[in-house]
Every structure is written in C-alpha cells, then in structure tokens.
Amino acid sequence: MARRPLPRILSSGSASITRSREIARTAADSATDVLHPLITVVRGLRLLAVSGRQRWVATPKERRGPKLFLGAACVLVVALVPYGPILALITVMGAAAWKGRERTPVRTGPDETETARLRSLYEALVPYFSTADDPDPLFAHGGDWAKAFDGYAFDDGRLTRLQVSYPAYFTDGEPAARSRIEQLLHTKSGRGREYHFSWDEEANRLVMTVLDALPTTIAAQRFVTAPGETVLGFTDPDAVSRTVPVRDGDTTVDASPVVWRTGGRSTEPHLLAVGHPGGGTTTLIRSIALQALQNGDVIVVDGGGTGEYGALAGRTGVLAVESGLGGALATLEWAAHETERRLITANRARQNGHPVPDDIRRPLWILLDRPGVLGHLAAADGRPDPQELLRIPLRHGRAAQVTVVLAEQFDALDTLTETVRTHTRARTVLGPASREQIEAVLGVEPHTTPPSEVPAGRGYVRLGAGPVLRLQVPATPDPYDDATSEAHRRAVLGLLPDRHSSVEAAPAREHADEGPATEQVPVAVDTAARPVDAVPVEAMVAEARPSEPLAKAQPAGAES
C-alpha cells in the first residue's frame, strides 16, 4: 500500500510552530520575571488570609465578639491617625511579601549515596537479625530498610547516628553477640572514628553514635575538688553529672571530670593503671602526685628507673623518690609499718575518746611505677618482691588514710600479685588497646570501639563496679624533659611545692646493694613540713629490718 503524504501544515509548518512555541515560552518567562513581586505579594496575601481564617475558626465562640470589637477599634484608630491607611497598607504589603517569599525546600530524606549506604548496612545485618523460621522477618534480603532503621543522621556523607530496631529473639544479653554487631557496624560505617553503642534490651533498639574527640589541650592545673577527690582526667559530657572550670589555653571552659574519691569512706581506695609504653600511665601518676601534694605526703617508687619523677625529689611533702631496688624495699617496708602505726594510733585514740591525731588523718600516697621490673630484680637478688610489702597498705590503707597507685604495662600483667589484683578496684587502661585487653583489666568491654591510634593519656576508666568511661588525662609531662613545651613546663613547675628548707641526709647505700641497671634517687625527709610526732623514714626502717640483706638497704641522702 502506498504511503500517504503528511498534511502540509505538519510538513512545511513545523519550523514555524517550533519558533512560535519558543517565542511564547520566552514571553511567559519575561512576564513571570516582571510580575514576580506581584505574584509574591498575592501568594503572601493568600497565606495570610488562610492563616487568619484558621485562627478565627480555632477561636472559641465566646471570645469572637471581643476580638471583633478589638479589630474594629484598631481599624478606626488607623483611619484617624495621619497617614495611617498608607502606613497600614505598606505594612500589610511587606508582611505579604515576607510570607509569600520562595523558600528553599528542606530535604527530609537521604540522597542516593546515603540510601545506598543504609541499604548496605541493612543487608549486612540480615544474617545476624533473621532466622528461617520467622514468618514476618524484619530483616530479609531485599527487604525494606526503612522499617528497621528508625533514625539516622549524616554529616558530609558519613553516618553519624543510627537507630536500629532488631527482632526480640536476638540474643542481646550475650556479650559475644553484641560484640559482633558492634564490630560489623563499626566496619561498615567507617574506620578511624570512635562509635558509642547504647543497647535498649526492653525496646529491642540499638543506637549507634559517633563520639567527638576528647580535648587534649587541658594541662595540669589546680582543679576545683573537695578533700579526698582526685581528678583522673576528663570524659564525655553526658557520661557524668558534674563539671569543673578548667583553663584550656587562654580560655576557661567547663569540662566533665572523672573524679576518684579516696579516704575512709571510699569504695575504691586503690588504683591500677595499665598501658603500653608511651600510653600515658606515667603522666597519670605524675598528675595524681601533683594533686596529692596539696594536702598529703607522697612516696614515689620508679621501677623503670627512667627518672621521670626527678622533679618531685626534695619537694615539701615528698617523703621519698626511689628507683633502686634497695631504696624501694626500704621505703615500702617503712610504708607498711607506717600503715600499722596509723591503725594502732587511731584505734587507741577512739578507745580513749580522743580525736584522731592530725598526722594520722593526713593522707599518705604510695605511687609505684613498673613494679614488675623491681620484682624481677628482687628475685634475681634473692630478696622479697616489693609487691609483698604492699599487702598491709592495700588491705588496711583505707582506714589508715593510705592510698596505693600502681602502674604497669600489658606485657607484665602476669607479674602482679593476687593482693594487687584484688584490692585495686579502680582501673584505667591508657593508650591503644584491643577490646580483649580492655576487658581483661576493667572486667567488662567498653561500649565504644577503641580506635587504633590515640594520643598519650587517652583510654578508659572504671571505678569499682561502675560503667566504663572514656578518659583523657591532663597533659602533665616531665618539666625537665627537653621535648616538653614551655607552656606545659611552666604549668607543672607552678604546681610543684617548694623544696625542703631543712633536709636530713642519710648514709648512702653501698654499690653492691643497688642491683644491676638501677639509679640512686635522693630520698627527701622534711621534718618541718610533717607533724612533730611523725616517725621519720630512717627511724622506721631502722626499727623494723626483717632480714640481713634488707638491713643494708637505707634511703639515699637527699640534696639540700
């Protein structure tokens, strides 16, 4: 069949029709641009009219009469005021123009990239939150992810918050099952950040949030605390219900502290800090020492022999700074006898109805860094383990106002005695560590994903049976270290007490009593700073010498 030709108007006039459409579209766009202010005002008047009608309908009938009378009175006043109608017209037009302006539409849902990320997370959770016997599974391959994810938030394309609803049969009470879900969400949401997981077992919901980095610019300073309170560091604002003002550079901010309470009513009177080399355990002990010296006496035993505590030697309130085996044993033995003396004196005072003497109520802090090294040297030399001398201070130190703080590294945890593990109920883990290592020290896993790289002094803390909190220790470096900045050096030196005005010097130890690779550190005894009835270190050691090798161990003389 022959093909019929198109009508002439469609074949020869198509170019004219196209040109006419372009002219009409251009004219319409020009008219819209010219009439845009009028269109905006008309739209605003319509919205104002709709809003006024809704308010009039929502007004009770008994209040409509007074409102109508008030409106009529306002109109009459405007009509009588000079230039009132013109001003009223200008005001109404301005309000209409503001009400009818074009607004940028608010995006209420995820874009394509965010939707793809949420669907990927949903598909990854299907094997863990579904079973073959579920007739109506919440998680299924190819299912609707919007039913499982109740809330989410993105920042620059990265997930910052996610609320997941999971089936009731999921074993959320088992730590292993929860750990698998947390590890999966951490991997799929992006590494390099720290996530917090909040499990609501009653509602079958899991909320994952990205945590902000803890401040590392807070240096050592005087913190606003009560007697018997020590600031270990700072944590997240929603983790504790207390804030303290601190200096952060040149400004003063409110920070959330982790406060450790010691003394007679403390439930966690002793502390154990564990970490890798460079994790910040020495910084924590130095920070605690600076706070303890405000109203107490301090004994420092540096098992590593690195000289990190040389700035404390000879200071008021610092009874001893030891790094050698002989001096450490003598000092810890004196601390054990001092604990017994305090207990006996306090008991006699209570029996006689007298108040406890001031020297008994003055706190005594025993700070021991790297006890495993000293234990190894003692075993090689046939001497008792220094940790055995801590048995009495650990067991009875709370009643005698004696506090023990130990710091050890992960590779020497097996050297800690059972007494140390039992009585150090306040625990901290500093530096990079796995979830298994954190659980081995704190007893439970943290509710966050530990990052692989953290600054010095960053870790976790748990006081007794309380929750696991993130921790950032205040910057407290060695002021005599060349790598210390000038600001931190001035901050630490400003907190150190003055040196002794009168120092009693004891005979120096023999070289054979030092042991290998140890360093003599002076022991400062301040007779003026302590009460009159306090027993000097040398006298206590001389009165109680259990063995012949220990009889030669005497505290080294201090530089005056």
Image: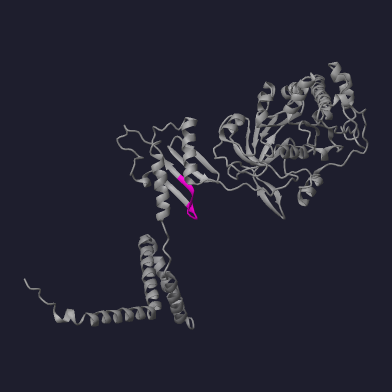
Instruction: Tell me: residue 239, above or below residue 358.
Output: below
**Image coordinates for residue 316, horizontal then vertical, percent:** 86, 37
Residue 355 seen by the camera: no
Name the residue located 38 percent from the left edge and 63 percent from the top edge. Answer: 55
> In which quadrant is the N terminus drawn?
bottom left
Residue 429 seen by the camera: yes
Instruction: Tell me: residue 204, above or below residue 95.
Output: above
Q: Tell me which secondary structure the magenta stretch mostly adopts.
A: strand
Q: Quadrant of residue 346?
A: top right
83 or 66: which is nearer to us? 83
440 or 90: which is nearer to us? 440
**Image coordinates for residue 483, horizontal then vertical, percent:** 76, 47
Name the residue located 43 percent from the left edge and 42 percent from the top edge. Answer: 164
Q: Magenta segment range? A: 154-162
Magenta highlight on residue 41: no
**Image coordinates for residue 4, horizontal then vertical, percent:** 10, 75
